[in-house]
């Protein structure tokens, strides 16, 4: 039987995943395809490059073609192709990382100076404020579970969640990420929260909403229900990390806390943290977050420093502490993240994804619902942002050949 282009894409993605654990973020397509890929020897990356190029020749411009461009780029990296870090990011996600001038961070620091007055350097004041609302480690699991329950109820006002969807929660240690939604298919997700690093109340709210409702879980379950089951789009049963799909998904998840916490449900969600003994001034916490947001681009600068400018880890660590206002522990965690094979390019997805999704939604709930339920291309989001006159923080890629 001749495979469809969607089946060929799934096979190629699964074969790519045999080389680096974590490249396949989720798969819930035909089990026999995954079984066949697992039973066979790993396919050489150069062979995957050729297969991806052959598939690109057959695909019209669209969402699936964008995905295959990302797949082909990453296969080329594994095959030893020589390309710059910026070229690799651009090929995977459809945006090109550019170095953000430190004047952007300095302006953010000035706003934070106003929000966090007091004695000592800004980084120390920011740390003291964060430490004042840390959630005790033994309270994290129960508090996250309560936030998920409240966020799920609030998300029903934005999108109709399919019957039978849900998540299970687990606490983990020694991971390069802070939290992860392992989407299992059949509308279910497994949310893992890493408690190795201290977590503030606002960070806990962000993290829980990001991974679940209306973040990753809401998106994956809605798209499985509407696109896979409803329209038969098999390509949506595979989630590949180094592709445009991930940038859109992270943009949705990063926008999700703003949608809930700045809306009518914010007070109810903040109240959940009181049960953990934290008195959270939500308005102030959100103001600090908004003021800090430009500093997320310091993380992209850090990746460019490490992978293109030849900076040492010590230099990059100091840079993240200064401009990203990170604790030493968080800076070390970020450096680990941008040097892991699975996630070395992934750092762009957080600030660029939020930038693009925020510009697309523009305060309209129906536009956020579209992100959760439809195949949205990075190129379309770039055009929307640019048409609105927003200054780009990541440059668009040229159309792929």
Image: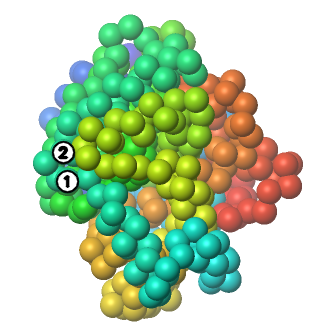
> Which residue is drawn at the image coordinates 74% and 62% (left, top)?
392
| Residue 251 percent location from the top left of the image | 55, 46
Q: Quadrant of residue 325?
A: bottom left
> Which residue is drawn at the image coordinates 54% and 61% (left, top)?
288
> Which residue is drawn at the image coordinates 41% and 49% (left, top)?
280
Q: Is residue 301 left or right of residue 338?
A: right
The local crowd at label 1, few if under 14, some if 14 to 19, many if 20 or more residues have their Cα within 10 Å, is: some
Q: Which residue is labeled 2 in the image?
A: 139
Q: Are marks 2 and 1 in contact (CB under 8 Å)?
A: yes
Q: Quadrant of the N terminus?
A: top left
Q: Which residue is labeled 1 in the image?
A: 136
| Residue 212 percent location from the top left of the image | 38, 33
> Which residue is drawn at the image coordinates 42% and 35% (left, top)?
269
Q: Secondary structure at mark 1?
A: loop
Q: Is residue 197 left or right of residue 157?
A: left
Instruction: Check residue 266 in the rendering and tell me which mark sits there, or answer none.
Output: none
Identify which residue, 109 or 245, lies in the foreground. 109
Q: Is residue 391 above or below residue 385?
A: below
Residue 300 showing in the rendered view:
no
């Amino acid at each position: 039987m001749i495979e469809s282009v969607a089946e060929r894409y799934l096979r190629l993605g699964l074969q790519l995943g045999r080389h680096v654990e974590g490249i396949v973020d989720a798969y819930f397509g035909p089990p026999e395809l995954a079984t066949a890929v697992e039973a066979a020897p790993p396919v050489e990356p150069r062979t995957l490059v050729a297969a991806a190029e052959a598939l690109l020749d057959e695909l019209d411009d669209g969402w699936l073609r964008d995905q295959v461009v990302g797949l082909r780029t990453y296969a080329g990296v594994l095959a030893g192709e020589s390309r710059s870090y910026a070229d690799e990011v651009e090929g995977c996600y459809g945006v090109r990382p550019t170095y953000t001038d430190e004047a952007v961070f300095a302006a953010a620091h000035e706003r934070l100076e106003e929000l966090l007055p007091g004695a000592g350097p800004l980084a120390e004041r920011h740390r003291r404020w964060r430490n004042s609302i840390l959630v005790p480690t033994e309270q994290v699991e129960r508090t996250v579970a309560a936030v998920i329950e409240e966020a799920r109820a609030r998300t029903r006002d934005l999108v109709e969640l399919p019957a039978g969807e849900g998540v299970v929660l687990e606490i983990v240690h020694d991971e390069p990420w802070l939290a992860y939604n392992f989407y299992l298919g059949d509308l279910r997700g497994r949310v893992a929260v890493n408690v190795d690093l201290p977590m503030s109340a606002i960070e806990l709210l962000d993290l829980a909403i990001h991974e679940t409702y209306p973040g990753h879980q809401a998106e994956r379950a809605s798209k499985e229900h509407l696109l896979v089951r409803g329209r038969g789009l098999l390509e949506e049963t595979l989630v590949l990390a180094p592709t445009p799909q991930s940038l859109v998904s992270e943009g949705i998840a990063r926008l999700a806390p703003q949608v809930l916490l700045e809306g009518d449900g914010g007070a109810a969600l903040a109240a959940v943290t009181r049960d953990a003994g934290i008195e959270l001034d939500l308005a102030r916490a959100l103001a600090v977050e908004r003021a800090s947001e430009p500093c997320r681009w310091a993380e992209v600068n850090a990746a460019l420093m490490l992978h293109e400018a030849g900076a040492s880890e010590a230099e990059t660590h100091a840079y993240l502490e200064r401009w990203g206002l990170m604790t030493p522990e968080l800076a070390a965690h970020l450096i680990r993240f941008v040097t892991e094979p699975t996630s070395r390019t992934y750092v762009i997805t957080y600030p660029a994804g939020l930038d693009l999704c925020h510009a697309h939604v523009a305060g309209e709930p129906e536009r956020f619902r579209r992100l959760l339920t439809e195949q949205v291309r990075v190129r379309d989001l770039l055009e929307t942002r640019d048409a609105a006159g927003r200054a780009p923080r990541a440059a668009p890629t040229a159309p792929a050949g």
